[in-house]
């Protein structure tokens, strides 16, 4: 994998080109001091000072009774004992507030590559839905998985020259309450050919999805041929799509082939062999029974487990899950 392949999958790189077939998004370049705020774990966890009175955490900053807590009196002793001043990003907050309003009042955030899915538990909604700058800052600051974007984006690149991109961006994507998780799919492209499609939410079996499998495959294949095949410049990559209730396909994301990208219903070994074995055929996999359900992959885990290479943490998790599935299948067949 090359750095340029990873860079093409940054949302600020691909979205302008594919915005007509994607989810409405507003993108902001992040100032370096905000990036450092996200990385800083040396002091207490402080949310930014809000300039808005209707923010998600009102009175957190502008409560007069608390102002004395942040005053340092002349001739005071050790300054290290004084309470830390909460950070403030007024210009960025104003820009983000405007974008949230333009996108209907609710958004879900992501950085160049990743969304803070592992910190959804800390939000008041239990999801990535945000309606204020403070809610976004809380999710970003609480996420361990975003360390990948911030510090390890190029770790799997053979021509690695840096540990981080030149700039970081915050993408705010319009929140749709009615989206169905079973209608999102990860698609695998090898040598510019679509070779595999996987149900994105692998922790649940959706019987209706099984019935629609053939028609969904046709929709996704046509979308790839019409919109992506000759326009996305990498030869090997993955892309996520969502199929709407009126059978429109929207591209949600792009990811590099292999490395930190999860293969979901496949293994990378299978995908590497798929094209040579099946020619132009597309292998479409969905969870077809409770025995095929995979373990959840959205929980917070150490960064080491994001590596899916041979011998890695996720590799072992997936192998164990496959072994458990095979054993359950054998037991079911023996009891039949």
Image (spheres, rainbow, N blue to C red):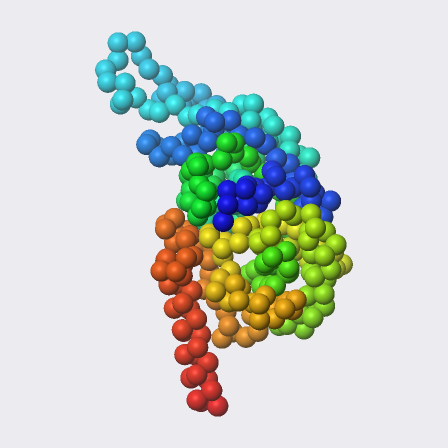
Q: Is residue 96 above or below residue 110?
A: above
Looking at the image, the residue that sits furthest to the top is: 74
> At x 40% / y 31%, what residue is drawn?
46
> At x 51% / y 60%, what residue is drawn?
263
For the residue pair 243 and 316, the one nearer the viewer reads as 316
Q: Is residue 88 above or below residue 77?
A: below
Q: Is residue 320 above or below residue 314?
A: below
- 45 left or right of 267? left
> At x 64% / y 30%, what residue is drawn?
98
Q: Is residue 131 above or below residue 306?
A: above
Residue 131 showing in the rendered view? no
Task: Using the rendered view, name the quadrant where residue 78 is placed.
Answer: top left
Residue 92: image location, x then y, percent: 55, 27
Q: How many marks?
A: 0
For the residue pair 126 and 38, the one nearer the viewer reads as 38
Residue 163: image location, x then y, percent: 42, 38
For the residue pair 16 and 280, the one nearer the viewer reads as 280
Task: Using the rendered view, name the quadrant where residue 288 is placed.
Answer: bottom right
> At x 56% / y 30%, what residue is drawn?
29
Residue 127: image location, x then y, percent: 53, 49
Residue 260: image location, x then y, percent: 46, 52
Residue 13 showing in the rendered view? yes
For the residue pair 94 and 125, the one nearer the viewer reads as 94
């Amino acid at each position: 994998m090359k750095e340029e392949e990873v860079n093409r999958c940054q949302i600020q790189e691909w979205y302008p080109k594919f915005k007509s077939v994607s989810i409405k998004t507003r993108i902001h370049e992040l100032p370096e001091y905000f990036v450092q705020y996200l990385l800083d774990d040396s002091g207490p966890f402080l949310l930014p000072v809000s300039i808005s009175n209707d923010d998600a955490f009102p009175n957190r900053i502008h409560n007069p009774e608390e102002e004395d807590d942040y005053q340092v009196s002349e001739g005071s002793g050790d300054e290290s004992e004084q309470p830390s001043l909460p950070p403030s990003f007024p210009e960025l907050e104003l820009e983000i507030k405007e974008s949230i309003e333009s996108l209907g009042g609710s958004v879900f955030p992501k950085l160049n590559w990743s969304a803070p899915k592992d910190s959804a538990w800390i939000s008041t909604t239990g999801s990535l839905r945000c309606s204020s700058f403070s809610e976004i800052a809380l999710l970003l600051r609480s996420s361990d998985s975003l360390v990948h974007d911030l510090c390890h984006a190029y770790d799997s690149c053979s021509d690695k020259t840096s540990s981080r991109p030149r700039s970081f961006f915050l993408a705010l994507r319009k929140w749709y309450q009615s989206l169905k998780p079973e209608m999102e799919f990860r698609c695998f492209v090898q040598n510019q050919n679509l070779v595999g499609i996987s149900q994105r939410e692998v922790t649940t079996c959706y019987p209706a999805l099984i019935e629609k499998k053939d028609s969904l495959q046709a929709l996704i294949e046509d979308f790839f041929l019409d919109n992506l095949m000759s326009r996305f410049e990498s030869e090997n990559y993955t892309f996520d799509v969502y199929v709407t209730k009126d059978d429109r396909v929207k591209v949600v994301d792009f990811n590099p082939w292999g490395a930190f990208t999860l293969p979901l219903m496949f293994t990378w070994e299978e995908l590497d062999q798929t094209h040579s074995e099946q020619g132009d055929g597309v292998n479409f996999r969905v969870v077809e029974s409770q025995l095929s359900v995979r373990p959840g992959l959205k929980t917070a885990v150490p960064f080491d487990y994001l590596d899916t290479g041979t011998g890695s943490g996720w590799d072992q998790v997936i192998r164990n899950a496959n072994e458990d599935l095979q054993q359950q299948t054998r037991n079911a067949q023996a009891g039949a």
